[in-house]
Image (cartoon, rainbow, N blue to C red):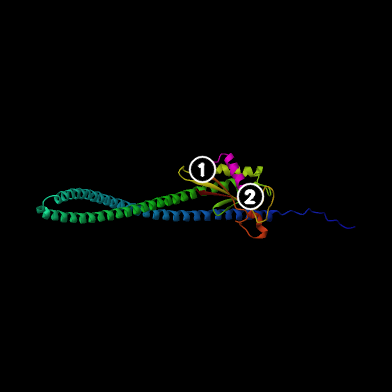
């Protein structure tokens, strides 16, 4: 008679699987932290560069202000010279009229006064020559004054341009600081999702998160995701000073697969309609429309040209920028 060995259930060893999963999660967390650290270093370098540019513009601004002040002084001196010459010409014209009257009177008198008349005539010619010279000086002074006014206008325009550029650089630096805080809040709220990611200075949602295929109508899940973004935008918007002109750009993108329907004749219409739908929803939720811009790029700004990854090109991008 054979002995039958009792059957033992096979043990399930889950420890290696758990260790592999834990290693994968830790590597993903380390990668996200490194990416965030690198983006912060890049932002600091950008801000330092902008500060240097602002300092350079400030030095140019002071130099132009000094040139402008010198030009104003020269312009005032020219005006004083013109006034003095005009007064002198007026006096000479008065003298000329007097001498002309005297000449007419002398011509009607006796021949004995011809010598006097000749002398008066000579003086009159000299006065006329002097008057002509003074008139030439007046004309030259007017031309110089006109040139000074033109130079003054050019300096004023250059000064205004530099002030505008300086304000733009300062706004760019301030908006960049708030953009970093905005992205940090969004990453914290949305977590590590493969369909929501940061690309350069933009926050990217895959279209499937917000819309159904070939549709520009926001789904309920997409609205929930936008609600989180809107909440973060309101918090940042309240912190941004009123003198900073900022906007949130909403860009719609598609892949290169053609679409042609009654509602969307091409990808241009689809991408634009999706961007507009997002903006309209954000306005409905309390975001001021003056801080929003909607744009459609169709399939012409792809992230990937690889056929296997065309779905990554179907996206909605958000960028906090200056106006």
What residue sits 61% from the left and 54% below the top? 28
314 sits left or right of 123 in the view: right
Q: Where is residue 231 in the image (x, y as percent from the top left)?
A: 56, 42
In the image shown, does 133 or 144 lie closer to the viewer? 133
246 sits left or right of 310 in the view: left
* Residue 275 inside the magenta-drawn segment: yes
- Image disc number at residue 281: none
Along the polypeptide, which appears first: circle 2 or circle 1? Answer: 1
* Residue 184 inside the magenta-drawn segment: no
Q: Can residue 42 be seen in this view?
A: yes
Q: Position of residue 218 (x, y in %)?
A: 65, 44
Q: Residues within 10 Å of mark 1 (few under 14, many from 20)?
A: some
What residue sits 43% from the left and 52% below the top? 165
Mark 2 to mark 1 CA distance (whole Å): 30 Å
**SS assignment for the magenta stretch, majority:** helix
Which region is colored magenta?
Answer: 268-290
The residue tagged 1 is 237
In the image shown, does 43 or 15 lie closer to the viewer? 43
Quick one: which residue is furthest to the bottom in this view? 306
Q: Position of residue 282 (x, y in %)?
A: 58, 42
The residue tagged 2 is 269
């Amino acid at each position: 008679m054979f002995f039958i060995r009792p059957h033992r259930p096979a043990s399930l060893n889950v420890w290696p699987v758990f260790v592999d999963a834990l290693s994968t999660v830790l590597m993903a967390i380390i990668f996200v932290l490194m990416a965030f650290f690198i983006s912060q270093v890049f932002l600091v370098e950008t801000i330092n560069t902008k500060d240097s540019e602002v300092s350079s513009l400030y030095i140019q601004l002071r130099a132009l202000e000094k040139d402008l002040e010198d030009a104003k002084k020269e312009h005032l001196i020219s005006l004083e010279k013109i006034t003095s010459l005009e007064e002198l010409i007026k006096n000479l014209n008065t003298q000329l009229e007097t001498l002309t009257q005297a000449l007419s009177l002398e011509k009607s008198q006796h021949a004995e006064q011809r010598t006097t008349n000749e002398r008066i005539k000579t003086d009159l010619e000299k006065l006329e020559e002097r008057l002509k010279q003074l008139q030439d000086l007046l004309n030259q002074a007017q031309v110089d004054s006109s040139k000074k006014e033109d130079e003054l206008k050019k300096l004023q325009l250059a000064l205004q341009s530099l002030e505008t550029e300086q304000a733009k650089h300062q706004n760019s630096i301030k908006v960049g600081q708030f953009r970093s805080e905005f992205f940090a809040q969004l990453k914290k709220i949305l977590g590590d999702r493969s369909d929501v990611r940061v690309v350069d200075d933009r926050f990217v949602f895959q279209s499937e998160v917000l819309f159904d295929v070939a549709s520009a109508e926001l789904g309920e899940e997409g609205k929930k995701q936008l609600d989180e973004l809107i909440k973060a935008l309101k918090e940042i918007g309240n912190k941004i000073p009123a003198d900073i002109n900022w906007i949130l750009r909403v860009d719609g993108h598609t892949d290169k697969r053609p679409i042609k329907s009654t509602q969307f004749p091409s990808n241009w219409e689809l991408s634009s309609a999706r961007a507009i739908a997002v903006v309209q929803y954000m306005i409905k939720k309390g975001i001021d429309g003056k801080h929003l811009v909607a744009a459609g790029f169709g399939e012409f700004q792809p992230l990937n040209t690889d056929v296997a990854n065309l779905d990554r090109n179907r996206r909605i991008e958000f960028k906090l920028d200056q106006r």
